[in-house]
Amino acid sequence: MTQPFADYQPEIYLNGLAEQTPPFTTDPTALDAAAREVLDDGPYWYVAGSAGSGATDRANREAFDRRRLIPRMLTGATERSLRTTVLGQELAAPVLLAPIGVQSILHDDGELATARAAASVGVPMILSTASSHSIEDVAAASGTGPRWYQLYWPNDDDLTVSLLDRAKKNGYTALVVTLDTWTLAWRPHDLDLSYLPFIRGVGCAVTFSDPVFRAGLEKSPEEDLMAAVLTWVPLYTGTDKTWDRLPFLREHWDGPIVLKGIQHPDDARRAADAGMDGIVVSNHGGRQVDGAIASLDALPEIVAAVGDRIDVLFDSGVRTGADVLKALALGAKAVLYGRPFAYGLALGGEDGVRHVLRSLLADLDLTLGLSGHRTPAELRPGDLTPR
Amino acid sequence: MTQPFADYQPEIYLNGLAEQTPPFTTDPTALDAAAREVLDDGPYWYVAGSAGSGATDRANREAFDRRRLIPRMLTGATERSLRTTVLGQELAAPVLLAPIGVQSILHDDGELATARAAASVGVPMILSTASSHSIEDVAAASGTGPRWYQLYWPNDDDLTVSLLDRAKKNGYTALVVTLDTWTLAWRPHDLDLSYLPFIRGVGCAVTFSDPVFRAGLEKSPEEDLMAAVLTWVPLYTGTDKTWDRLPFLREHWDGPIVLKGIQHPDDARRAADAGMDGIVVSNHGGRQVDGAIASLDALPEIVAAVGDRIDVLFDSGVRTGADVLKALALGAKAVLYGRPFAYGLALGGEDGVRHVLRSLLADLDLTLGLSGHRTPAELRPGDLTPR
Amino acid sequence: MTQPFADYQPEIYLNGLAEQTPPFTTDPTALDAAAREVLDDGPYWYVAGSAGSGATDRANREAFDRRRLIPRMLTGATERSLRTTVLGQELAAPVLLAPIGVQSILHDDGELATARAAASVGVPMILSTASSHSIEDVAAASGTGPRWYQLYWPNDDDLTVSLLDRAKKNGYTALVVTLDTWTLAWRPHDLDLSYLPFIRGVGCAVTFSDPVFRAGLEKSPEEDLMAAVLTWVPLYTGTDKTWDRLPFLREHWDGPIVLKGIQHPDDARRAADAGMDGIVVSNHGGRQVDGAIASLDALPEIVAAVGDRIDVLFDSGVRTGADVLKALALGAKAVLYGRPFAYGLALGGEDGVRHVLRSLLADLDLTLGLSGHRTPAELRPGDLTPR
Amino acid sequence: MTQPFADYQPEIYLNGLAEQTPPFTTDPTALDAAAREVLDDGPYWYVAGSAGSGATDRANREAFDRRRLIPRMLTGATERSLRTTVLGQELAAPVLLAPIGVQSILHDDGELATARAAASVGVPMILSTASSHSIEDVAAASGTGPRWYQLYWPNDDDLTVSLLDRAKKNGYTALVVTLDTWTLAWRPHDLDLSYLPFIRGVGCAVTFSDPVFRAGLEKSPEEDLMAAVLTWVPLYTGTDKTWDRLPFLREHWDGPIVLKGIQHPDDARRAADAGMDGIVVSNHGGRQVDGAIASLDALPEIVAAVGDRIDVLFDSGVRTGADVLKALALGAKAVLYGRPFAYGLALGGEDGVRHVLRSLLADLDLTLGLSGHRTPAELRPGDLTPR
């Protein structure tokens, strides 16, 4: 098997990036600054901002810096493959696009552009319940591309069932349930700007297009946006679920279920005990609990607790190929990749997402090989320095 | 019980902050810079400045950054309450306004504005002996709001007794005795600016209005300010008390007494042995001993020493809801909140203080819930990472 | 024996640097910024840039900062010598010029200038396979100066044998085999600038001048540069060797062989088991595996594993005399010195390289003596603080 | 006993600093920037510069930041005294002015101004062998002020004996022998500027005025400066002494002898074994061995080794009163205070030195008392946090 992703590097050297409009960068740690140039305050900070003082976001990055790869030489890592099995599904790489809502604030094509880019690279997109486009439209844009569905769990069981049904019918093969955002955190940038996309109906498309939701309205959202928004808000905010509600999801979803937002080993054990198929260790990129444990610091104990029972995915702070390898070495099966692709979307729509994704995978492929490994599954804790 | 404080968040999203004059921020770590814009050098640095090289102030913040919350999922934290019992008194939240003197250098309304704002939110104000307004006037502004009295312990027992009597008569329900400021520290910003409010009579109102003090003057402060100031200074500075003087306070104050400025477990034990009701672990926000231990680093050993005997409060460095939770997890019953509300006062008088306080409580309420807790009392050391 | 290198210091004080054009500096940590002034983006970033996020480069420097020398007094270190024996060869100092390719992007004289400067100081130059000048021309410029040859191991055994033969015939006395660059890493600066010297034929001189290589071309590189480049690229990139190929090198090189790029003690053991004469602990200055272990952090365990069997050299991050001493104290026999001399080359050609090299050796000589030592061999782990 | 030094604080508040010309500051960490404004490159960097990369200088400060004072309350520290006994001599405070040479590059009055200021505050000045003014002239300026003499140990025994005799005759009561500067370190700032005061005869006054030295010249320095300088240089540089030479000093100096520059416990033991009266733990403010251990990090082990046999003084990095207390808590009897007073000299001659010194002592006095102590001798390791 050849290295399809590493091929993107010679392509860039030969064809160049510098002439592109808007200019891209191959440095995932520089995408933020590039996106800042093209976005207005509201959309930029909605994506880049954190809860509270931003401490968790900084902690996420610092936890990666503290751990270091120990490369091995002469292992013959010429032939490599990034292919990975997660939840029984074979993925092109141990990477998925994290569920990010309201993508139309970044680019007119929003989630449709992201879906097309992800499909063209063969990486699963996880569609957010807060998408700017409907489940059906994104599935159409995704085509034969792999796709998962992320659930912000509504406070209305009929609506929940309807959403799950639509996702199943439209080819979403796994369900990711976000636990950490049953109410919105204190996010100073958004508050200072009074910028909340949902209040303008942005990110409500999945729900607005739902027959159960529409049946509960007097007029359609197209006719009375404000009434729809005011119905939407309490469906999604303010109510924390409890562990005893999980059987309801299992009953209405026959594919794998993954709980996203786990940060404590005991919660990981409860997820496994509840028959979940996987978890995502995540602090929502530092957007929910200010001052929370760095996601990478939470990973090892959680893997020790449940890594042999369920698939552990990782999210929050991934920027480079080395970051992916570090998460894998600590026991994650795959990682979710978030803000960087959103910046790519802002910078260049579908092309931008594809460029950012191909850059990450090329970086990952090269770093995997140069570290002396042939596959993601080879990584072990001993491939890292002690923290 | 609903979440009254978290409601402030949707209110901001709907009504906006950006249009307000003067502009506020919901980021407590950004208030300093905002206040810098509206204050002259003297008042700004009097509040923002530290002792010596500022090392203690930086250490206070760094100690919070080093410890991290481990959020729990699916706990059903929808219904929360911040109500807390401290010294046998029920508080709306585990937060009190720290005693800050000379508030009229920040806003003409000074402590009156602070008292009105604190009362409107239901949070106790701790009135400083160095207030710009008298005990009686602040009590009137406070109305039915909870209030404590902070004592800079005068070098004159008659005056001390008179101050305590006035506080009692005016509804101050607890006494906070500051131990760490019996002489003013080396504060380069104030010294370089030769800015000391007391020399101009600012912050002397409590004493100037005292009948015992006035009886010792030939002319009233209104008639001869300089003579009053020269009498005032030696009453408050240069003389350290000793532990054997505490029975005198107990004799003249029948409510709870709290010693503020404790940083060593042995001093905490002596406070408990002396029959005090509580202590405040504090380094005066880094304004007294340069190079002192971070207040949060001092907290755990002190709680271990006396936490089962007396109420331990925390002060110094609190900026965010997560900070409050960290202090609670380490055993504090409540925290004192200082500089940020002073910046709010500078930015918008009563409205500014109220905004800052409501922001902190909303942040705290949301972070409490998103961490998986329903009440402040639930927090345990295990909810934090090891330092 | 006198201190020939320290003499450079009084020479500078007496004759001055400030008047020189272009201006030099004696501060090796300032050379980077000075070179930035005179180089275009492409060449500057090719040398200064790192893999990925630059984390490994920063880690290299931080690892030096974390360890500190403990100087000794009154040892009579007046008479000193930097002479060192490595691989049975006596060196003027425990320092070699690291193999850096494509030096003509920095200065027209490229490796010829470097060879002349190195020879004039008596320090070995390690000639890169990616040199801008041929093995023979650099040997001629080097004259009687000591020289080693660095091999990027071609994917063609005949070419490999030819390169080794030419190196031997031209007086290169040791072979340094680079293991960590069998494919180029993800280097954002070069990618963003689409700057790869090899694609323009720069750094291909050693191969272009090789009879085996030329025999495989229809037209000579002078006649058809692009065809030569397209033949060159796959010879050097994309294929990782394995340990069982080392006997091939031993068979075709009768001098000492050193493996460069070792970062794990087990790889060091395999190198010793394979009969290699030495290793270079190196992460290629942070240019290959982003997020890799700091080279200095890898050194102690590797010395413990093989230090008594083979010579361990050190590379990556050396900037000052103190850095050299720290690597020696941890068991390295000598260090490779890279980017700073490249900056010297950019700033002043042969004079620039000589100045940078004499500065390092004067700094090293003085710091050795002021630390209380007479020779590099005296340094022990106990001369450093614990990490 | 009253607090004479703390009195400087109310004096400043009442009389102001802001109006002074040139403006001073009371923040010792801000003096560097203030001096930068008034000094030319050469003199500024001669004082502010470090060896090599400046790592040791930064380490000195960082070591202070890492350790923190734990203040005690209600100890009755009203009445304090800074008086300290060192080498059997009673000092006004545990502070001495470090020996700094060539002070005339900072201010025309040079060491004479420093001597007058030190005497007026009652703090010992340690006169450098590299003084811009002679032993006799500085003694006259010092008057009845306490004074010690620092020896750069010449490579000529007759000259050494002559210097010691002159020092004794002129009332210098202790001898400080600097061990760490028998040759000048690699100091990039001075080298880049080709700035070495001695080459212009600055800092040679002590030697130029010596009868033994003058007897060895054909013409006096006033008649032939260059010949005198060329005789001077080899007398002071390039030759490291050894431990067996110490009896020579003891033979020719009947007062206490202190070895300056000790950084290893074994060297401290040798000093005690050699009958020395004291040592100064010092890395010469980071000006000699780049990358050396922070002086404060070296202190505890050295005190453990010899603290009960000889007096251990501390030097390198002291800026604030808290720094002094930290060194005392770790076992130092007193500290040497260097660069800040040199900046004071540059800013305001005698007045500037006095202001800086009074500021430090006022800060020290206040911080001592606010930490709960009455005398320097009370400080113990337990008054600091673990490192």
Image (tube, coloured by chain):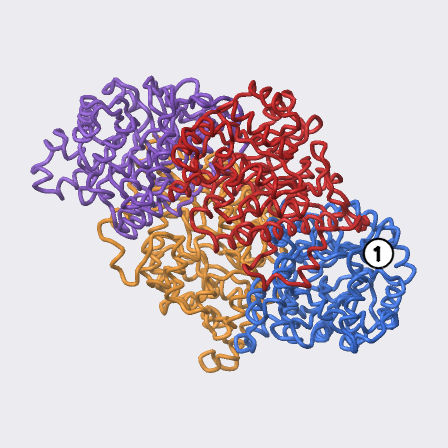
Chain colours: A purple, B orange, C red, D blue
Residue B246 position by quadrant: bottom right
Residue B283 position by quadrant: bottom right
* Quarter in which the C terminus of chain D is drawn: top right
Front residue of this view, candidates A348 and C36: C36
Front residue of this view, candidates D171 and D108: D108
Residue drawn at (33%, 52%) of the image: B26
Does dot 1 land on a helix, a strand or a loop?
loop
Q: Does residue A106 appear in the picture of this structure?
A: yes
On the picture, is A271 further left or further right than D239?
left
Residue D36: percent from the left, percent from the top?
A: 57, 67
Is D277 above or below relative to B305? Answer: below
* Residue at image mark 1: D277
Residue A29: percent from the left, percent from the top?
A: 40, 42
Residue B51: percent from the left, percent from the top?
A: 55, 61
On the picture, is D66 further left or further right than A137?
right
Amino acid type assigned to the residue bearing label 1 in the image: Asp
Residue drawn at (83%, 53%) of the image: D241
Q: Does residue D68 appear in the picture of this structure?
A: no
* Quarter in which the N terminus of chain D is drawn: bottom right
Q: Label 1: few (<14), some or many (≥20) within 10 Å? A: many
